[in-house]
Amino acid sequence: MTDTSDREIVHSRLLNAPRELVYEAFTQPQHVAQWWGPNGFTNTIHEMDVRPGGVWRFIMHGPDGTDYSNRVVFQEVQPPERLVYEHGSDIDNDPNRFHVTTTFKDQGAKTLITMRLLCQSAEQCERFKKFGAVEGGRQTLARLEEYLPSMR
C-alpha cells in the first residue's frame, strides 16, 4: 500500500448526537446549508443528490463577499456510515479537485465523524494547508456540532 500521508488532511470530531442524525445533517440540503464551511460562511445549495454518481452543487459565500462555487460528485454512499466523493470547483475536470472519505462511527449516543481529504499531490496539499484548510475543517465540524441540537 502506498503511503499517502503527505497528501492527506484529516479532520475528526466526536459529536454528541446519534450517527443517523449526524448523517442526516450531512446529507440533507436544508440542514447542510446551515452549518457547512468555516466561521462566517453561508451557503446556497443548487442541488444535492446523495447517491453514487449524484451531484451536490453549491456556492459558499465568504464573510468578505467572495463566492466559491463547489461541485461534489458522490462515488460511494453507505447510509449512515460512509460517503466517498470528489470535491472541486463547479467546473468540469477541475485540476484542484480532491478526494474525500467521510465516515460516521457509532459511539453509542455519540458519533465520531472523520473527514479524510486526499489531495492529488503533496504540493496541492501544502497549498490547501496554507489557504487554511486545517483550521477551516476544524471550524466546519464545530459548526456542525453547534447545529445538531436544533435538529432534535
Image: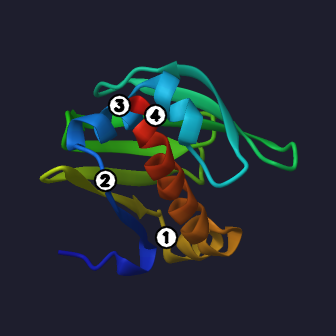
Question: Residue 32 at what x, y percent from top left?
Answer: 49, 34
For marks 2 and 4, give the CA distance: 13 Å
Lower position in the chain sequence, tag 4 or tag 1: 1
Name the secondary structure under disc 2. Answer: loop
Lower position in the chain sequence, tag 3 or tag 2: 2
Q: Nearer the viewer, mark 1 or mark 3?
A: 3
Type of the residue with mark 3: Arg
Q: Is residue 6 positioned above or below 147 on the image?
A: below
Residue of label 3: 152
Type of the residue with mark 2: Asn
Residue that appears at 31% across and 44% down: 84
Type of the residue with mark 4: Ser
Query: Neighbour class for label 1 at 10 Å: few (<14), some, many (≥20)?
Result: some
Residue of label 1: 121
Name the secondary structure under disc 1. Answer: loop
Relative to the observer, which residue lies in front, 118 or 11? 11
Name the secondary structure under disc 3. Answer: loop
Residue that appears at 69% across and 38% down: 42
Lower position in the chain sequence, tag 1 or tag 2: 2
